[in-house]
Amino acid sequence: MKRHLPPLLALRFFEAAARHRSFSLAAEELHVTQSAVSRQIRTLEEALGYPLFTRSIRKVALTPRGVRYQSAVEAALDIIERASSQSPNAKRSLTVSAPQSLATFWLIPRLSEFARNYPHIDIRVTTSNEPADFERDDIDVAIRLGAMPGTPYEIDQPEVPQPLVKNWHGVHAAHLWDEVLVPVLSQKLLSQSKPLTTPADLKHYKLLHVALRPKAWTDWFRCVDARYPRNARTLEFGHFFMALEAARAGHGVALAPTIFLDGPFGANGDIVSPLPAAKKSAGAYYFLCREQLKSDRAICSFINWLRSNGQ
């Protein structure tokens, strides 16, 4: 039978808050904000249908039901902790959040290799293009494309407008791969159309845009010292994977990260990149996790595998 469980992330927050009798101390332990703890406790109370804490301006206290619930939750978590620590090779699961295009074209096609090399680690993939939010989402790690605060970029590099995370408090970031953009189109379209040997020749082709990166093509033309075509014919798609599928179908030229072409999508040869003008973006792919988990064995194995298989 299907279990009817409360939100498991909220249980973790509740256990810390109940043990400390303090939302702020729980926030320090979990490396999140006090508002994140308060939000998760409220989520749990809504799921249970009764209050767990009484709140005043300076302190919180467990209700009688909260005291009983704390005892039950601590006992359950103790059992889980003991069971999980019995063997160093115990099965682990990592919930990974990745942008949809990266998950579709790069990560998912390679997971069978990861499973062969690390059979004791299960990878569960969720997709999101939003900034990673470790206070809200029940994820272990995230891969995001963005500009790292404080990193200097050249003025002529294509902009990456999305921030990496919602809140940097308690978040560890490690560089994975640079993003390099290059125009691509189907071999069939290229053979049936006018020559494409310089950026200026793109005026003869329909340009496929991605809504999340509205300035990508204009930035790219600026970077290669070329002018965006006057009266350019365009199509817009929600994600890179949509624009790439449209390019493969012969609808025009997409501006694609080269990492998407190093795998099953580019292996069959029906997508080509006739222009050598690849440009590095003002941003990169980063591996993100909670600061206190950056040395976790499974997380370290996963990031090492990502780096060894990337650019």
Image: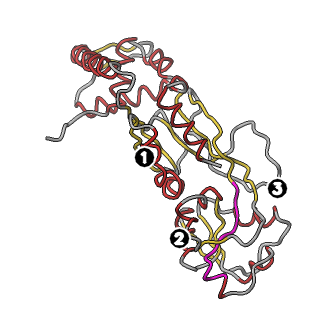
Decide if residue 136 is on the left or right side of residue 306: left
Residue pointed to by mark 1: 125
Q: Nearer the viewer, mark 1 or mark 3?
A: 1
Question: Which of 288 and 218 lies nearest the eye of the viewer?
Answer: 288
Residue pointed to by mark 2: 245
Q: Is residue 136 magenta?
A: no
Above or below 71: residue 128: below
Above or below 257: residue 95: above
In terms of secondary structure, where does tag 1 sit? strand
Task: Name the residue: 62% across, 82% down.
Answer: 189
Residue 160 point in image, percent of width and height: 68, 52
Task: Name the residue: 76% across, 58% down.
Answer: 279
* Magenta region, residue range: 180-190
Above or below 62: residue 247: below
Amino acid type, label 1: Val
Q: Residue furthest left?
A: 1
Q: Is residue 181 magenta?
A: yes
Amino acid type, label 2: Glu
Amino acid type, label 3: Asp
Quadrant placement of the N terminus: top left
Residue 64 point in image, percent of width and height: 22, 14
Of callouts 3 and 2, the N-terminal one? 3
In which quarter of the view is residue 266 placed?
bottom right
